[in-house]
Image (spheres, rainbow, N blue to C red):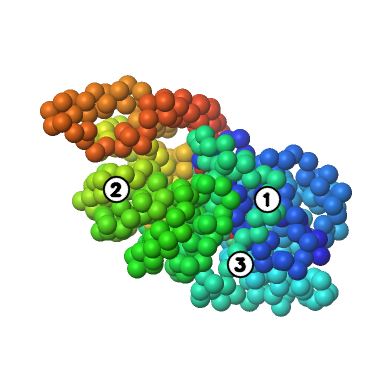
């Protein structure tokens, strides 16, 4: 069968941190080696209708995160209008969390959860003319609702997940990169674990994976890191280094390989704080940037978020990364109940800890989670393009537009060139006093890059006020 996999466009209102390779679709392509598979990345190519009418696929598979929902539905409708007889299958994060959103007349089947086995079986059922009802893990749109087939038992091991087939994205390769990346080669994505043992209140990942944490064995992790195209890659895990023994084995294998790959990954602060030797070893084998969810600057907030960490651990993790020479991409939550003092406290913490490249995420109830259900009556908007952790979809304690202004100010202050120069001057004074440069992140963020980040964030956040105004206006209209 001919299968066209579609990565939807990104709504221009989504303040996205990057356009990386659609790993989920590459994994599906890896599972469908007995079919003819093409991938259409709508973020970089415009004419989906032409692709569908010229290549004439039998099945079109569309993926979507919550923020991609609107564009995914547009793509589905465009495909259906072009080829009324093609089968359209939807899967991915949003379909798993909110299948009812895809109970659309244009959709033939919704795949729930990990999709490779379900999709393969569904295609085999189509090819042999069998009823898809026997395939486990589906929701089938019917009379405006959904009929669910038997539940698929959760995967017990990572080995069942096929390797991605990257040949389907070869023509887009150089365009896959994080928003603020200057690397002309782009960045590859590799997955080495699934889910997270954490239970943070705001996070959908452990809920989407039903609380499981599956790890890929270190040999195959290193094999894929080495095989990934280009020099830079990001590990698309929620929590890459939970198993310390496994992490050491990965270090050992990478050391032996003498690779020069640069790796960026997501790690918890407690893992970092408790394992300084491991962090140094990871740095030596190419782990240059860690994305760490510190989330808050008070123990009370950390408890409220069920983060399972304390401020003491967070501070220790910051020290360990600095000493190991790893860039600390610190992530913090900005809660809807923040007052001006809370923004100021967060800003102060960043200054005190001299964090150079933090990211701020607005607390967002992710559709399909109990938190979202509880927030139903409070939501300011149900437009999914705004569920990007940058727009605020809940009522704020401060005036809504002032909240926006404080949020932008937080970024502008953090990434101001003035702050950078002041840090530099302070460090210079310490150098004169002690004869040594103090250990800071300065050396990972050279002046030119700091200037670039400042301008890039200004541009990234520029359209935000207009959106906040639109959300407030629409909400007021709805209330009256
Ligand atoms: C790497 C990553 C990124 C990267 C790359 C994303 C990309 N492709 O460009 C970057 C950093 C750029 C990014 C950006 C964003 N991200 Co992100 N990201 C991730 C992360 C860590 C891994 C994603 C991944 O590759 N997973 C691995 C694949 C294999 O798993 P999967 O997608 O679930 O796929 C399986 C099934 O779902 C299914 N399936 C998937 N699609 C389809 C399609 C069909 C037809 C079928 C049959 C099956 C199927 O089969 C697959 C294989 O079994 C996830 C967390 C996570 N662990 O999933 C967050 C996550 C996906 N991101 C999230 C968010 C919110 C964002 C941003 C909005 C943040 C921001 N403001 O920048 C943007 C939005 C991106 C956009 N489109 O604009 C949320 C999404 C929440 C939601 N409900 O949608 C997640 C879940 C994190 C979280 N816990 O909050 N992200
Ligand atoms: S540690 Fe990270 S991925 Fe795990 S539950 Fe918490 S926020 Fe989610």
Query: In the rendered image, which residue does mark 3 sit on?
Result: 162
- Which element type, helix, strand or loop, lies under badge 2? helix
Asked if labels 3 and 1 touch by Cβ distance under 8 angstroms, the answer is: no
* 388 relative to 464, above or below: below
Say which of marks 2 and 1 sits in front. 2
* Disc 1/disc 3 C-alpha distance (Å): 16 Å
Q: Give the farthest residue toward the left.
A: 433
Cα distance in 3D space between marks 2 and 1:
35 Å
320 left or right, relative to 412: left
The image quarter containing residue 101 is bottom right
Q: Is mark 3 within 8 Å of ligand 1?
A: no
Q: How dense is the environment of label 3, judged by Cα within 10 Å: few (below 14), some, or many (20 and up)? A: some
| Quadrant, the N terminus | bottom right
Label 3 or label 2, whichever lies nearer to me, is 2
Where does the image place residue 316, in percent across and percent down from the top left?
A: 23, 50
- The answer to whether any part of residue 321 appears in the image is yes
Residue designated by label 2:
324
* Disc 3/disc 2 C-alpha distance (Å): 34 Å
Seen at 52% across and 57% down, the residue is 226
Is 358 placed above or below 261 here?
A: above
Q: Quadrant of residue 278?
A: bottom left
Q: Secondary structure at mark 3?
A: loop
Q: Are marks 2 and 1 in contact (CB under 8 Å)?
A: no
Can the viewer see residue 103?
no
Q: Earlier in the sequence, mark 3 or mark 2?
A: 3
Horizontal and vertical percent position of residue 256: 42, 61
119 or 431, which is in the foreground?
A: 431
Q: Which is more N-terminal, label 1 or label 2?
A: 1
Instruction: Identify the element where label 1 is drawn.
Output: helix
Which residue bears the numbered disc 1? 169
């Amino acid at each position: 069968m001919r299968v066209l996999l579609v990565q939807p466009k990104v709504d221009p209102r989504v303040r996205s941190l990057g356009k990386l390779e659609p790993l989920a679709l590459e994994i599906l392509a890896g599972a469908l080696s007995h079919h003819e598979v093409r991938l259409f990345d709508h973020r970089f190519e415009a004419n989906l209708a032409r692709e569908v009418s010229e290549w004439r696929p039998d099945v079109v598979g569309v993926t979507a995160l919550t923020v991609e929902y609107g564009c995914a539905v547009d793509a589905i409708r465009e495909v259906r209008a072009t080829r009324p007889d093609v089968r359209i299958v939807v899967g991915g994060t949003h379909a798993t969390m909110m299948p009812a959103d895809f109970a659309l007349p244009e959709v033939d089947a919704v795949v729930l959860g990990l999709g490779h086995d379900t999709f393969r079986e569904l295609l085999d059922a189509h090819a042999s003319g069998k009823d898809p009802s026997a395939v486990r893990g589906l929701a089938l749109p019917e009379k405006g609702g959904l009929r669910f087939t038997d539940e698929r038992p959760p995967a017990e091991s990572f080995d069942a997940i096929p390797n991605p087939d990257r040949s389907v994205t070869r023509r887009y390769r150089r365009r896959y990169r994080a928003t603020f990346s200057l690397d002309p080669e782009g960045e590859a994505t590799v997955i080495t674990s699934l889910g997270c043992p954490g239970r943070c209140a705001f996070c959908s990942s452990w809920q989407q994976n039903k609380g499981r944490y599956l790890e890929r064995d270190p040999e195959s992790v290193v094999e894929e890191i080495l095989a990934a195209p280009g020099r830079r890659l990001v590990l698309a895990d929620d929590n890459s280094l939970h198993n310390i023994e496994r992490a050491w084995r990965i270090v050992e294998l990478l050391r032996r390989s003498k690779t020069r790959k640069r790796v960026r990954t997501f790690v918890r602060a407690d893992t970092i704080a408790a394992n300084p030797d491991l962090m140094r070893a990871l740095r030596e084998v190419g782990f240059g940037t860690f994305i760490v969810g510190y989330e808050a600057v008070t123990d009370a907030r950390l408890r409220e978020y069920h983060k399972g960490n304390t401020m003491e651990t967070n501070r220790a993790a910051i020290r360990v990364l600095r000493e190991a020479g790893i860039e600390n991409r610190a992530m913090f939550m900005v809660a809807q109940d923040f007052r001006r003092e809370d923004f100021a406290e967060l800003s102060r913490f960043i200054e005190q800890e001299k964090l150079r490249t933090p990211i701020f995420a607005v607390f967002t109830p992710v559709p399909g989670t109990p938190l979202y259900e509880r927030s139903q009556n409070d939501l300011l908007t149900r437009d999914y393009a705004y569920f990007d952790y940058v727009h605020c979809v809940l009522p704020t304690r401060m005036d809504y537009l002032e909240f926006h202004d404080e949020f932008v100010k937080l970024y502008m202050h953090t990434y101001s060139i003035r702050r950078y120069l002041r840090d530099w001057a302070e460090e210079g004074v310490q150098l004169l006093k002690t004869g040594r440069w103090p250990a800071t992140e300065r050396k990972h963020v050279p002046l030119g890059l700091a200037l670039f980040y400042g301008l890039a964030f200004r541009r990234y956040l520029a359209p935000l006020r207009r959106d906040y105004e639109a959300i407030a206006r629409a909400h007021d209209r709805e209330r009256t």
